[in-house]
Image: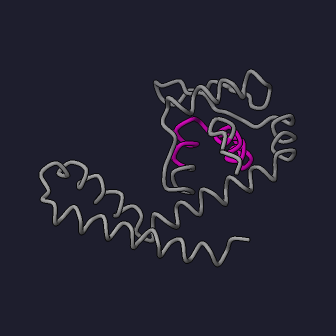
Amino acid sequence: MKTIDYRGALRLLILYSLKEGPKHGYEIMKELENLFGKAPGPGALYPQLRYLKQKGLVTATVSQRGAKKIKIYSLTDEGLKYLEENREELEKILRHIQGAKTLLDMGLKRLAEDIAKVIKILHDMDEDDKKRLREILENASREIELILSRYSS
């Protein structure tokens, strides 16, 4: 199974966001958060925007908003062409992210929070509770594997 190139994925998602029209960085982050439940931070987004600008896939113009100057990013014709050439990869990334968001909404988020709490107190747990946790996790894993087996070839 091919792993996801997260920088490449983020680049495609930025271009996908800009396909709808020009945006500043914060608007791109908020759109990605609304679509997928999680936004890239500025430390991830802005280096990718600089990269895309250097490659000629986006342009940046400085705009004045009150006393603040902001950069507005726009998709170039080359960026649109790149997005089309990588349409299959983009669709795979969108399906992956939507699937992850759905799974989080189905209870994975709560489970991850509970596991984080367990990690903090694991050293204080008695052996009976540790054994019970192991059984719960093994049963959950078996149940998931049963479901997966119906979709594997």
Whether residue 10 is situated above or below residue 57 in the rendered picture: below
Residue in the foreground of this view, choosing between 109 and 23? 109
- The quarter of the rendered structure image containing the C terminus is bottom right
Residue 115 is drawn in which quadrant? bottom left
Seen at 57% across and 57% down, the residue is 35
In this view, the residue in front, 5 or 149, is 149
Question: Could you tell me residue 138's position as x and y percent?
Answer: 39, 68
Q: Position of residue 143 (x, y in %)?
A: 47, 76
Total numbered badges shown on the rendered structure: 0
Residue lying at 63% horizontally and 29% vertically, measured from the top left:
48
In the rendered view, tell whether residue 109 sits above or below residue 13: below
Which residue is more in the foreground, 4 or 61?
4
Can residue 18 be found in the magenta stretch?
Answer: yes
Q: Which residues are magenta?
A: 9-30
Magenta stretch, main secondary structure class = helix
Q: Position of residue 16 (x, y in %)?
A: 71, 47
Front position in the image: 96 or 27: 96
Query: Which residue is depicted at the point 78% across and 24% down?
Result: 55
141 relative to 122 in the view: left or right? right
| Residue 114 appears left or right of 83 | left
Q: Position of residue 70 (x, y in %)?
A: 55, 27
On whether residue 7 falls in the magenta region, the answer is: no
Above or below residue 27? Residue 97 is: below
Res 58 quadrant in image: top right
